[in-house]
Image: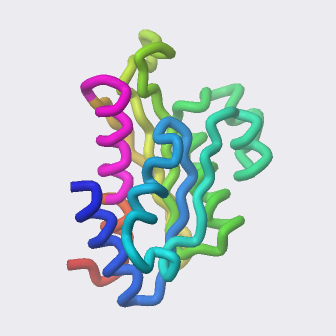
Amino acid sequence: MTESLAQQLGNMLSEKSLTCTTAESCTGGGIAAAITEIPGSSLWFQLGWVTYSNQAKIQQLGVNEETLNTHGAVSEAVVQEMAEGALRVSGADFSVAVSGVAGPTGGSKEKPIGTVWIAWSSKSDRQTISKHFHFNGGRAEVRRQTTMASLRGLIELVPGKG
């Protein structure tokens, strides 16, 4: 399923000569890995970041330290800044950013295991949208579901889809 979503995204972006980029935390590069499994993805995939630490989010993507301190890494505000920073730095047409609690540790009452925020940003309409998810399952399942939701969201951003 992940491969077919990545292939669909690649076909759509290639057809329109558009590109995407990723900024990942809880998926650890899984979205970029799914994309680069597709032959020819270098034509439509710019680059990806794995910004697991808060410091990496600040240094690599320009996430505001105050945003991290106020909202925490697993938050709408942070993933939006990650997506916008990835778009700005990469020059891509679209970006996706993810941050979440994949488990088996790290959950809290406010942010239990399976809590994920995903943001998608588009250069053409200067729009960033975000969505909160709660995925079930163990670490691998949460990461897999996050990757699939991220790819679906990118597909939805491409103009003239389907």
First to last magenta residue range: 136-151
* Callout count: 0
Give the percent coordinates (x, y) of residue 12.
33, 80
Q: Quadrant of residue 71?
A: top right
Please tell me which residue is depicted at 50% across the width and 15% down the height of the picture.
Answer: 106
In the foreground, 31 or 112: 31
Q: Residue furthest top?
A: 109
Residue 36 lies in the magenta-colored region:
no
Question: Left or right: 111 with respect to 144?
Answer: right
Q: Quadrant of residue 34?
A: bottom left
Please tell me which residue is depicted at 60% across the width and 46% down the height of the picture.
Answer: 50
Q: Main secondary structure of the magenta part?
A: helix
Q: Is residue 153 above or below residue 28?
A: below
Residue 126 at least partly seen = yes
Q: Is residue 81 above or below residue 127?
A: above
Residue 142 lies in the magenta-colored region:
yes
Q: Is residue 15 above or below residue 36?
A: below
Give the percent coordinates (x, y) of residue 49.
62, 53
Residue 125 at least partly seen = no
Q: Is residue 128 above or below residue 53?
A: below
Give the percent coordinates (x, y) of residue 160.
29, 83
Question: Left or right: 119 with respect to 73?
Answer: left
Give the percent coordinates (x, y) of residue 155.
32, 68
Please tell me which residue is depicted at 60% across the width and 65% down the height of the picture.
Answer: 47
